[in-house]
Amino acid sequence: MNAPSSRLSGFHKQSVADRVARVAELTGLNKADCELLAGTGHLDLDLANRLVENVVGTFNIPLGVATNMRIDGRDYLIPMATEESSVIAAVCNAGRRCYDNGGFTTSMSGTQMIAQVQLMEVPDPEHARIRILERREEIREICDGCDPVLVKLGGGFRDLEVRVIDSRSGPMVITHIIVDTRDAMGANAVNTMAEKLAPHIEKWTGGRHHARILSNYADRRLARARCEWRPEDIGGADVRDRIMLVSHFAEADPYRAATHNKGIMNGVSAAVLATGNDTRAVEAGAHAYACRNGRYTSLTRWEVTREGNLAGVLEMPMAVGLVGGATKAHPMAQVALKMLGVKSAEELARVFVAVGLAQNFAAVLALATEGLKGHMKLHAQNIAMMAGAKGDEIDAVARRLVELGKVRADLAETELAALRAER
Ligand code: MEV
């Protein structure tokens, strides 16, 4: 079959059913495929169709609950949406090992977001910079005027920064408006303010404005978590010291740091997604922050305390909200938030950063000790299921794959057939 043309005129205007029929015809989807597409689970098709464009179905991934998590003296059941095995188990494991020692302590720098206005063709950029800074109170009025509800809730304009940067298109004057967005992630609020402000900046400076958009490098919205694990809870002082070596590797080497931080985001993104928040915004902020000193490094730091405990810290931008977007619209996000029982976006961010630290602890512990055997075991179970194993066959086939040291789909099929023949 030749690849179908992707020029589907009027596709976006069609009903979901008509889109499915058209795609099925073009790509050879059969009746069973179309039935799968029609089963949208808890996400109503009309809602899905309003959330994004060209909808043909929904995509389910498992939702699990991380247990054993004690954060700031309170226990949380943390919903996590992920397709990756061992991510949720890792958080439970990390939480269990520090629970009796008090769990996680968190804090936050604030809930401020930044929006940028790009200004070009300014003959005197340094002079223009100061002229914009002089308008601070006027800028406050323009920004706060865009969102009286936010102001009433205690948020609104907080600060102004103006930078002159060099670029391949010459100097640019970049205005940052810094806005406390409280319980909203804030993208819509700050984007609206930047739009409104841009023509005024043009007028004051004689320049020409271009992009007006929030920055995902939310370094005024830093969430911080710390936690101590006692040597006896993690397999002894020797394990602790080996964890230090693994973490120093990630601090020093960007190749390792990328994987180390990916592990942190395994946990953070799963929890962020479960609540309907924007995983890409948080990921962009995390990686930008990991580069803040000019070289990409690990987001966590590990130390040994005077008492000999393993102490971990994680600090990262955490632009998440409780209101607006999919958080409010997605029924499962609402269930997830109910389960969490958080009262503010700040509390939500603090839970997420604790999850990130827990996830990283579990990863460095595994790397410092048995490697990723635990991970492999869960992966083997997935492969066994993909090969058609059911019920207790799943564990049996997975065990054989792990014993063989080869977790492969073809071997899973062979092992499953052998098991069934034996029974
Ligand atoms: C796997 O998804 C994540 C890890 O590779 C993270 C790490 O290496 O730190 C286990």
Image (cartoon, rainbow, N blue to C red):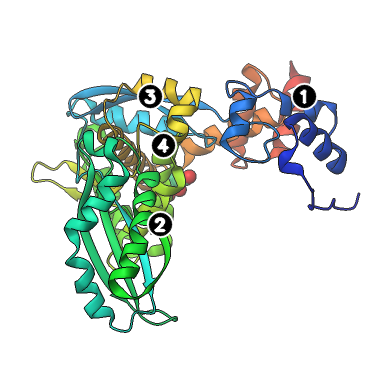
Q: Which numbered disc, 3 or 4, marks the residue that appears first in the sequence?
A: 4
The residue furthest left is: 306
Q: Are marks 4 and 1 in contact (CB under 8 Å)?
A: no
Whether label 4 lies within 8 Å of ligand 1 gets the answer: no
Per the rendering, the mark at residue 272 is 4
Query: Which label lies toward us, 2 or 3?
Result: 2
For disc 3, the neighbor class at 10 Å (few under 14, some 14 to 19, many from 20) is many
* Residue 56 horizontal/vertical position (percent): 71, 34
For disc 4, the neighbor class at 10 Å (few under 14, some 14 to 19, many from 20) is many
Report how far apart the C-alphas of labels 3 and 4 lie in the structure: 11 Å
Report how far apart the C-alphas of labels 1 and 3 lie in the structure: 31 Å
Per the rendering, the mark at residue 35 is 1
Q: Are marks 1 and 3 in contact (CB under 8 Å)?
A: no
Q: Are marks 2 and 3 in contact (CB under 8 Å)?
A: no
Query: Which label lies toward us, 2 or 1?
Result: 2
Report how far apart the C-alphas of labels 2 and 3 lie in the structure: 28 Å
Per the rendering, the mark at residue 157 is none
Given the image, on which type of amino acid does mark 1 rest?
Glu
Quadrant of residue 78 in the image? top left
* Residue 208 horizontal/vertical position (percent): 40, 72
Q: Nearer the viewer, residue 266 or 98?
A: 266
Report how far apart the C-alphas of labels 2 and 4 lie in the structure: 22 Å
The residue furthest right is: 1
Query: Which label lies toward us, 2 or 4?
Result: 2
Q: Is residue 115 left or right of residue 29?
A: left
Residue beneath disc 3: 337
Q: Is label 3 in a helix, a strand or a loop? A: helix
